[in-house]
Image (tube, rainbow, N blue to C red):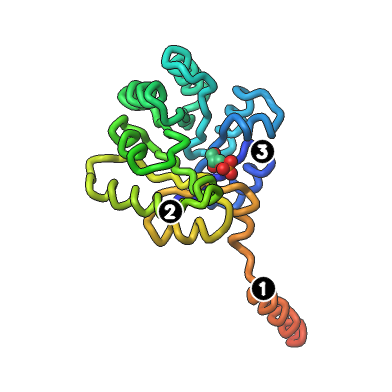
Amino acid sequence: MKFFVDTADIDDIRALAATGMLDGVTTNPSLIKKAGKDFIPLIADICSVVDGPVSAEVAATDYETMIKEGRKLVSIADNVTVKVPLTPAGLRVCKELSDDGTMVNVTLCFNAAQAILAAKAGAAFISPFVGRLDDIAADGMNLISEIVTIYDNYPHWHTEILVASVRHPMHIVDSAMMGADVVTCPPDVIRKLYDHPLTEKGLDAFVEDWKKTGQSIL
Ligand code: G3P
């Protein structure tokens, strides 16, 4: 399973890239607003830090402007993935850019029918938003299970399931259990994956006992 980070904070991206376990980045207009930097140079910076796909989202909602924005975003770096909304115009842009060999991430997916459309449009990634479904008392992870089943039925579809709107470590564990291809997570959620009180307690005991041996490995 691939790990993407869902942020436009370049410092967080650098720190996570240094772990060697970061496979890509996703951004959206809200994350760009939060970062408070100019969009195009920021995406270029992120692409220079991370080798994997970096999602940059179009701002327009009409086909004509979206396709121009998409082509401009693609020109920033080889690893830019154009992110488009799951609308008729967005899927038209997805089909056209995908046919030209551009990676497209179709975002704002909230049901399996929409995920079928994205695969038909040749998307490299479909982004189902699990947290936002949970927020309205729906079952976000059930959507992932449905999409995994559907995509497995059609091996010629190459769309990867990119679990988005991840809120906590169990979203990641459940995504892995279901066989989702990618999770994109806020930096804090990735950091939480490391945490276990028994790990800390056990390490403290090992450190103390090692000191008592009076030995040194180096
Ligand atoms: O990048 C899209 C998605 O991950 C947004 O998550 O937390 O705003 O629902 P959230």
* 174 w.r.t. 118: above or below: below
Report the amino acid beneath label 1: Pro
Which residue in the rendered view is the most extreme toward the bottom?
Answer: 213
Between marks 1 and 3, how big is the CA–CA gap? 28 Å
Comparing 14 with 210, the one in front is: 14
Query: Residue 184, position in %: x, y?
Result: 52, 46
Query: Residue 77, position in %: x, y?
Result: 50, 26
Report the amino acid beneath label 2: Met
Comparing 119 with 101, the one in front is: 119
Left or right: residue 194 versus residue 78 is right
Q: Quadrant of the C terminus?
A: bottom right
Q: Secondary structure at mark 1?
A: helix
Using a 10 Å C-alpha cutoff, classify the residue at mark 3 as few (fewer than 14 neighbours), some (14 to 19) or many (20 or more): some
Using a 10 Å C-alpha cutoff, classify the residue at mark 2 as few (fewer than 14 neighbours), some (14 to 19) or many (20 or more): few
Left or right: residue 145 versus residue 169 is left
Left or right: residue 69 versus residue 9 is left
Between marks 2 and 1, how big is the CA–CA gap? 25 Å
* 177 w.r.t. 46: above or below: below
Which residue in the rendered view is the most extreme toward the top?
Answer: 64
Q: Quadrant of residue 95?
A: top left
Q: Which residue is mark 1?
A: 197
Q: Secondary structure at mark 2?
A: loop
Comparing 66 with 193, the one in front is: 66
Q: Which residue is mark 2?
A: 1
Q: Which residue is mark 3?
A: 9
Q: Quadrant of residue 13?
A: top right
Tell which circle, 2 or 1, labels the residue nearer the N-terminal end. Answer: 2
From this viewpoint, is residue 23 visible?
no
